[in-house]
Amino acid sequence: MDERSAGSDPVGTLPAVPRFYVTTPIYYVNDAPHVGHAYTTVNADALARWHRLAGDDVFFLTGTDEHGQKVARAAEEHGVTPKEWTDQLSTRFASAWAELNISNDDFIRTTEPRHHRTVQRFLQQIYDNGWIVKDTYSGLYCVSCEQYYSETELLEGMLCPVHRTPVEVLEEDNYFFRLSAFEDRLIEWYEKQPDAVIPEAKRNEALSFIKGGLHDISITRTSISWGVPVPWDGDHVFYVWYDALVNYLTAIGYGEDEERFAAWWPAVHHLIGKEIIRFHCVWWPAMCMAAGIDPPAQVQVHGWLLVGGEKMSKSSLNQIAPGDLVGDYGVDAVRYHLLRDTPLGSDGDFSAEGITARYNSDLANNLGNLLARVATVVGSKCNGTGPAPDSDSRLAAVAAAVGADAIEAWNDSLPHLALEATWRLIRETNAELETAEPWKAEPGPEVDAVLGSALEVLRIVALLITPAMPTAADEIWRRIGLSGSPAEGRLPEDASWGRYPGGLPVEKGEPLFPRRKA
Ligand code: MSP
């Protein structure tokens, strides 16, 4: 299914522009950002940048999830008010994303008045539609997950399956969302929309959970006050997940700007980690149905970054701060490693050895080396002026095939495949140079043809890596004498062979990715 919708044109004369609304989960502010959070955010950023390059109208949302028991407890442990705590931590997430060159269009905080209004409006609508009722509930609750578990789901010793910490027995007089009433509708929706959840294995997981039978769920709390008040009963606040999911609607004007809301919903692409499938792929579509709006067009589920086989998280004390890595390797190298080495959908190991090996093989020895050797030889054989590409170069066909594969992979939201394809072109070009050895030849048309084609490859590569490594892409663009930024380009058109004009000054400069000690 194409999750993009056509933008409306009030005058009716312009061609419709596809829309792409991409979101990350909003991050709990019970602790500081780590590389696991960065993994989701960098992937979402790369998808947003890709869609901008494809000419789509893009809205990229991330933010922080600031209510609930977990956050209230973290504030208490640090001796500050929840407001002070969330202000501090939210800023740390925003700065981590700035360090990683994240291009989000909005940063939502669930403590903002705009969000309170939307949560109340949305849940009031579900209540008015008759899908919320009052009842008593007793269950086994994990505070870290902010979720009830059934006994069979727990690990031995009544431990949470995600955090491996004891669950608590909680009994509450609560409002319940009648999730059980949506079982058939959800199954029907899954059958009609085969791509609503990708990859397929995760879709099947969500579907079999639904087919296993759904229970009504408790959506309010009286035990805490750090939340959004229930509009029809002041003794209750909404349970943090019910409040959090609504962020996706707040940012696009649900209930406040109907035109804007209709433009972006339901054409959304939610990127989430595998531990929150149930919330996004069962509860959330059911809540949307209950409120009378369409469920989200697509949820893409990814795996975990593991350290020594364990999920990187606050509880396992194995977290690595994104800023430390950026300081050490540079922003583009960190982004590249996250995008290239852990395919969306699988778990991946995160280690200093892994990032260094990838850096040296792909960035220093391949891309960096190609740029350096081309610039050096243009300096010595062409007086520093880049020649035009050869229209008959063997590389033209390689670039066309790679361009098609990379573009298809970006369109399928699979950055690792897009980058793998792009590096095929880089390797082939290095190999071509090694065969032609222009550094040994006399200046003349043959050398010009080889170097012009290599410059053309660098231009195409800069475009194709823009979503992943925007800073390096800009620098390559500048060094081969092009003005502006590859981010202003349009794909696929601009990836066609022969657009490097020649006659431009080529700058050698410092190594783009100096080799690192293993
Ligand atoms: N606040 C909820 C989400 C609400 S969305 C309406 C939440 N927050 S979280 O901070 O615990 O996690 C947010 C996301 O961070 C996870 O879904 C996952 O995408 C990502 N990750 C956190 N740790 C991770 C790894 N170790 N590896 C990969 N992603 C990880 O859940």
Image (tube, grey):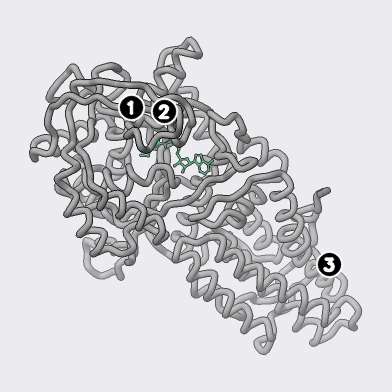
Q: Residue 237: percent from the left, percent from the top?
A: 24, 23
CB under 8 Å between discs 2 and 1: yes
CA distance for labels 1 and 3: 66 Å
Q: Residue at image x 53%, y 73%?
A: 405
Instruction: Name the quadrant of the N terminus.
Output: bottom left
Kind of residue sitting beneath label 2: Met
- From this view, report whether residue 305 is shown above or below residue 76: below
Asked if residue 146 lies left or right of residue 497, the reply is: left
Which SS class for mark 2? loop
Residue 21: tell me if it is visible: no
Q: Which mark is residue 158?
A: 2
Q: Residues within 10 Å of mark 1 (few under 14, many from 20)?
A: many
Q: Amino acid at mark 1?
A: Leu
Q: Locate residue 178: give its quadrant.
A: top left
Query: What residue is disc 3 on?
Result: 376
The residue carrying mark 2 has its beta carbon less than 8 Å from ligand 1: no
Looking at the image, the residue that sits furthest to the front is 156
Q: What residue is disc 1 on?
A: 140
